[in-house]
Amino acid sequence: MQPSCYTDGYARAMLPPRDLWPDIVCDLPALQYPARLNCTAALLDGALAAGWGTRVALAASDAEWSYADLANAVDRIAHVLVNDRQLVTGNRVLVHGANGLTTAACILAVMKAGLIAVPTMPLLRARELSVIVAKARVDAVLCADALCAEFDGMPDCPPPLGFGALAELMKGHAAAFTAPDTASDDICLISFTSGTTGVPKGTMHFHRDVLAICDCFPVHILASRRDDIFIGTPPLAFTFGLGGLLLFPLRVGASAVLLDRPSPEALLAAIAAYRATVCFTAPTFYRQMTPLAAAADLSSLTRCVSAGETLPVATRAAWLDATGHALIDGIGATEMLHIFISAAGADVRPGATGKPIPGYRACILDDAGTVAGPGVIGRLAVQGPTGCRYLDDPRQADYVENGWNITGDAFEMDADGYFYYRARLDDMIVSAGYNIAGVDVEEALLRHPAVLECAVVGRPDAQRGQIVEAHVVLRDAAAAGTAMVLELQDFARREIAPYKYPRSIIFAKQLPRTETGKLQRFKLRRH
């Protein structure tokens, strides 16, 4: 690795042992980055040097920022963090807010200042945030004012700086901010993802990784252009949204529209209002928008990207019939930062996710770790310019095998090199584009005094892909009924992020277990 400029070396020290890293492949000329690199400086200072200062960079319901406006805001926030808050390079800064101009500027500013951004989704509650704060050893919190209360009394957490107070401090800094001499492999981003155990895993990414995802999928599959206007629903705290709604447009001088409260109706209206050309959202949203598309003005759209969950063939066909647009399917992972298998245009094959995008390679491994040929369902293995590096987590050894990233997905490859999704290898529930660990929901429900036992599984659903279904054993079986269902659902919404709550609750006398006491989830799925 290159010599780090960081004063705080915690994150680099917490990287996994080198023999557990995946092989990094940088075959494309565009992926040959200089040894000293700051990704935000490359994106924004580079944009100004290219003469894009007056172009619209980001738009939201309350304002519109040019590239010059965004660069100015980023520099002011960086000054606040370094000069007012006395943070040093390598410190971790948690950013907590809905998609919007300030949230975007904060993430970029943290990285430009030589700090490490830890973006978190606005729906997360105090219990979930506290785990992230402790794991990343967060040194500062930048937070939307309405969400600051989630951090009240949180152990080992610095008091949050609300966006309102941040705006006041920004007024005191008008000078440009010069990025420190960060190495291309200095960590600039820790993205958290819930694993099958429910314990969040911090995935650590370098400055060069941020640019690498901009120089692969958007270039070779999406064919991004400077006149594009990106729009979509995934939060910036998800790497799908961070790339599609911030990094990708900035890399080519395009624009992005940030929606803080997306719904199918709102997204369709915004596409028409902003004349958006590229849409990023999950299959669930495309399913929900399909019957509404005829009444919407989608004439500006040219490309529609679907990721975050499995894209059903029926959804792809229905969207094509309703809009004339063939969905660009893709699979990515927080560990890999963004999409690595996809296809667009004439290369789309019904039922297939696609092929490895230029810059990445993939194969199917059998249980013995041997590369399998066409027609065999096995473990998806991927290599490329990005890869899994967990923050101080023994599960690194599970994700990386012989230099390959093992994504946890079961795929099949055909003779032409197309990859077909078959199933998850674990018990993760994917609902409306959100990854939900069943154990998170179980732990929440078990905190309710009426619940004796519970087990959570994913139930297939035509609209959301899957829904969270809880099988609950009550302490008093006589309390079972509609009223208890509503009470438990409301309780779960208060305890954990609302998107995780069980949409289906089934009361049972007992849960199926083996003789050794292990829960038999497969029996619940057959219920």
Image (cartoon, rainbow, N blue to C red):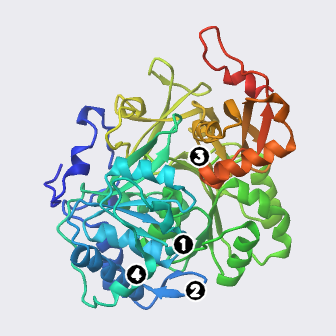
In the picture, which quadrant includes the C terminus? Answer: top right
Q: Nearer the viewer, mark 1 or mark 2?
A: 1
Q: How far apart in space, not on screen, are marks 3 and 2 (Cα)?
A: 30 Å
Query: Where on the picture, by quarter, is residue 294?
Result: bottom right
Q: Is residue 86 left or right of residue 31?
A: left
Disc 3 versus disc 1: distance between alpha carbons?
25 Å
Q: Which mark is residue 62?
A: 2
> Badges 3 and 2: C-beta atoms under 8 Å apart?
no
Query: What amino acid does circle 3 point to?
Result: Asn
Query: What amino acid type should be assigned to the residue bearing mark 2?
Result: Asp
| Residue drawn where x is 58% and y is 28% of the image | 374
* Residue labelled with disc 4: 165
Q: Amino acid at mark 1?
A: Ala
Residue 287 position, x and y percent, is 77, 56
Sequence-wise first label, 3 or 4: 4
Q: Disc 1 vs disc 2: Cβ atoms closer than 8 Å?
A: no
Residue 430 or residue 517, whichever sits in front: 517
- For disc 4, the neighbor class at 10 Å (few under 14, some 14 to 19, many from 20) is some
Q: Are marks 2 and 4 in contact (CB under 8 Å)?
A: no
Tell me the SS state at disc 4: helix
